[in-house]
Image: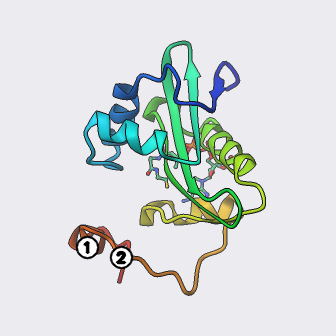
Amino acid sequence: MNNYKIIKSCKDIDFSQVWEILHFYGLSDLDIDTQENAFKSSYAVVFLMNGKKIIGVGRAVSDGITLAALCNIAVRDEYRGKGLGKVILDSLLEEVEGCNVILYTHPKHIGLYEHWGFSKLKTGYAIFNDEEHYRNERFIE
Ligand SMILES: CC(C)(COP(=O)(O)OP(=O)(O)OC[C@H]1O[C@@H](n2cnc3c(N)ncnc32)[C@H](O)[C@@H]1OP(=O)(O)O)[C@@H](O)C(=O)NCCC(=O)NCCS
């Protein structure tokens, strides 16, 4: 698919659409304004646009020098499997070039990130606010 635009700024973004995409997959339980703040506070953001419709999103939390954590990478359901997830990933990686890049994903997507060149962490640790949820979903032991 190539009839989309890559936007790397939060200016003029309709965050109700971002909220809709992330909530569809259960990737966020924030309200729209808080979700907008999270994107605006991020080091890098990516929105894929098909006209006024947002069809994919992603962001990186980073110092821009040493470490970047990728999060909220999602493509609207009807646009999945067309290479757009990779476009979002590559756009974010471009913005954090030189950083070590980390992420955690849903257990069902583990193979995907290996497919995209990521190595599995052997010494990764996390403190989650809603630990029970992340344990039930098999993010943590
Ligand atoms: C994860 C997601 C962003 C990927 O986006 P996408 O546009 O469907 O992905 P792409 O089409 O760019 O790439 C898919 C590629 O990965 C491969 N792939 C998909 N799942 C895989 C898996 N579990 N193991 C190995 N490879 C996998 C596909 O075969 C395809 O390979 P190809 O490009 O060489 O043909 C999208 O599926 C999504 O929004 N998922 C729901 C939201 C979510 O859970 N996001 C969390 C991610 S942190």
Residue 32 is left or right of residue 102, and the answer is left
Place of residue 73 in the rendered image (x, y in percent of width and height, measured from the top left): 51, 47
| Distance Cα–Cα, label 2 vs label 1 | 8 Å
| Picture quadrant of residue 118 | bottom right
Place of residue 97 in the rendered image (x, y in percent of width and height, measured from the top left): 76, 55
Residue 78 is left or right of residue 134, and the answer is right
- Specify how the rendered protein is coloured: rainbow
Could you say whether the residue bearing mark 1 is in a helix, strand or loop?
helix
Reading the image, the residue beneath label 2 is: 127
Residue 44 is left or right of residue 100, and the answer is left
Amino acid of disc 1? Glu
Tell me which residue sits at (50%, 60%) in the image: 109
Could you say whether the residue bearing mark 2 is in a helix, strand or loop?
loop
Relative height, residue 17 to residue 89 (above, below): above
Reading the image, the residue beneath label 1 is: 131
Q: How many marks?
A: 2
Of all residues, the one furthest to the top in this rendering is 51
**68 vs 133, nearest the viewer:** 68
Tell me which residue sits at (41%, 22%) in the image: 14
Amino acid of disc 2? Ile
Q: Quadrant of the C terminus?
A: bottom left
Residue 6 is left or right of residue 126, and the answer is right
Relative height, residue 3 to residue 25 (above, below): above
